[in-house]
């Protein structure tokens, strides 16, 4: 039962939600029928193993005996109960989310729509007026403008349903909000796309078939929305062919001045754009940006920008360590690795992310054999398998091990045979370029400045390559 869909979802519930789901199952309104008591008892058995959900306690045969003591085993009976419990669990998650949202503007909008559909004009007007004030006073976010658009539509639908031929049916306002929301959304998507293109060195991302700039007739919208103005400005800075440090400075100044006007999630998103800008600059060879990026990371961590639903995103857990180590902040990296290892969103069941971070720290400490001991054998995806294998290759290189050529050959075969099924072409090329340069570094003797300079030229000439800064460091050491 340990790796079932049911248990995966239950494991994601908070302690409060675990208790609430039991109350949900105890309610005949939601859980009725002949199997209701069996479903409740099954859940109690699972819940009793929280928070670790010990695999030995959840072996299906053991659970079956607890659920039906002294009863003859019937094939498929437990599985059917699990399927029914899973249906109820999904219902609970949706209902509980809606119930916790009762004070939100989304809930108020649904209530306003209900009043409109039932033709309760006075109550509709009261609800609509209050909701409009609440939404207008919100801090800047995409959801705010989405709500303003939906409110304009609600007003239009009401006036269309009760058309007394003496008004404009709120069409001008509906049209204005539609234009505003569209420009904010499309500019946001163009911004995300340009970041992805630069990060992956890919030219195959979608063409939006829209002007790169906001149409002249719609530029007045920039003055009506702080969100549109800021998103447009960041897009203009990031679309430059060669990014500049002045762009980072402009973004930081803008966020410091206008950050208070943004809703938390939106501010968090904009800081992720700033971090991406710094990362892209670093990839261009501007390594002096890395200490600033590490400082931004630490500040953003304290503010909770890397967290979601109480946990740290696993890509942040890995990424923050890489930046810290690249700036020589080994002690911070070690402390962070231990402090957050049990706080990864979705869990880290096989300790893959922890072991990767630990291995990276040991590599930085020059404890290369210990580093090899920590590298996981398996990974959640081919992308992270390649990530782990590159750490292994680095450790063997530092040890000047005779095994390195064989490891590089194995790495290449993995990229050629396994990675194509799940890794993008450009990432395959980046990993192959890494293996090629690493092999050349290994074959070069120390104290060979000419060969070192030639290798540096090759590394810097590669448009796409993994771990560029590490390879540059190793090439310089050969001189």
Image: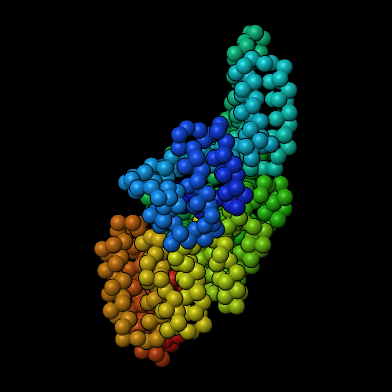
> Residue at left 48%, top 61%?
54
Depth check: give the residue in front, 240 or 167: 167
Work out which quarter of the rendered image holds the C terminus and state it: bottom left
- In the visual, does 398 lie left or right of 149? left
Give the quadrant of the N terminus: bottom left
Q: Residue at x 43, y 50 (%)?
A: 69
Give 244 or 162, whichever is nearer the viewer: 162
**Image: 336 above or below 264:** below
User: Is residue 22 visible to us here?
Assistant: yes
Q: Where is residue 332 shown, x and y percent of the image?
A: 61, 74
Q: Position of residue 228 (x, y in %)?
A: 61, 42
Residue 201 visible? The answer is no
At 64% from the left and 26% from the top, the residue drawn is 111
Residue extending furthest top?
164
The way the protein has been coloured in the rendering is: rainbow
Q: Nearer the viewer, residue 97 or 326?
A: 97
Q: Is residue 413 above or below residue 33?
A: below
Residue 365, x across and y down, in percent: 52, 82
Quadrant in the rendering for residue 455: bottom left
Horizontal and vertical percent position of residue 448: 39, 89
The residue positioned farthest toward the bottom in the image shown: 447
Q: Residue at x 36, y 89 (%)?
A: 445
Q: Count of labels shown?
A: 0
Asked if 331 appears above or below 168 in the picture, the reply is: below
């Amino acid at each position: 039962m340990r790796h079932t869909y049911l248990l995966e979802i239950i494991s994601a519930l908070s302690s409060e939600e675990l208790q609430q789901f039991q109350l949900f199952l105890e309610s005949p309104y939601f859980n009725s029928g002949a199997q209701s008591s069996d479903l409740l008892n099954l859940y109690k058995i699972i819940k009793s193993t929280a928070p670790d959900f010990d695999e030995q306690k959840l072996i299906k045969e053991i659970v079956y005996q607890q659920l039906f003591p002294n009863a003859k085993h019937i094939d498929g009976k437990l599985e059917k109960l699990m399927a029914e419990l899973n249906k109820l669990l999904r219902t609970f998650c949706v209902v509980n989310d809606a119930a916790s949202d009762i004070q939100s503007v989304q809930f108020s909008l649904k209530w306003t729509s209900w009043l409109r559909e039932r033709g309760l004009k006075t109550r509709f007007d009261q609800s609509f007026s209050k909701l409009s004030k609440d939404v207008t006073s919100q801090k800047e976010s995409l959801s705010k403008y989405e709500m303003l658009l939906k409110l304009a539509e609600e007003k239009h639908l009401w006036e269309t349903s009760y058309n007394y031929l003496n008004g404009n049916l709120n069409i001008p306002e509906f049209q204005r909000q539609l234009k505003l929301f569209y420009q904010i959304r499309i500019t946001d998507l163009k911004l995300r796309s340009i970041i992805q293109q630069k990060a992956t060195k890919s030219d195959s991302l979608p063409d939006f078939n829209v002007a790169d700039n906001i149409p002249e007739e719609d530029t007045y919208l920039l003055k009506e929305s702080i969100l549109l103005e800021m998103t447009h400005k960041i897009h203009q800075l990031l679309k430059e062919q060669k990014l500049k440090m002045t762009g980072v400075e402009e973004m930081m100044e803008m966020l410091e001045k206008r950050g208070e006007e943004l809703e938390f999630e939106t501010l968090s998103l904009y800081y992720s754009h700033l971090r991406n800008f710094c990362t892209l600059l670093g990839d261009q060879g501007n390594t002096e940006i890395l200490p600033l990026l590490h400082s931004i990371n630490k500040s953003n961590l304290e503010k909770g920008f890397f967290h979601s639903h109480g946990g740290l995103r696993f890509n942040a857990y890995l990424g923050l360590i890489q930046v810290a180590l690249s700036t020589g902040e080994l002690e911070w990296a070690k402390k962070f690795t231990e402090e957050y290892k049990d706080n990864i969103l979705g869990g880290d069941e096989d300790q893959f992310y922890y072991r990767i971070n630990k291995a990276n720290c040991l590599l930085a400490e020059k404890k290369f054999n210990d580093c090899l001991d920590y590298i996981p054998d398996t990974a959640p995806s081919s992308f992270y398998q390649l990530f782990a294998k590159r750490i292994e290759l680095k450790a063997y290189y530092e040890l000047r091990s005779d095994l390195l050529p064989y490891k590089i050959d194995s790495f290449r075969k993995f990229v050629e045979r396994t990675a194509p099924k799940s890794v993008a072409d450009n990432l395959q090329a980046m990993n192959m370029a890494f293996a090629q340069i690493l092999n050349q570094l290994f074959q070069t003797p120390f104290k060979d400045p000419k060969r070192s300079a030639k290798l540096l030229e090759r590394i810097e000439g590669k448009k796409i390559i993994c771990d560029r800064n590490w390879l540059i460091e190793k090439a310089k050491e050969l001189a």
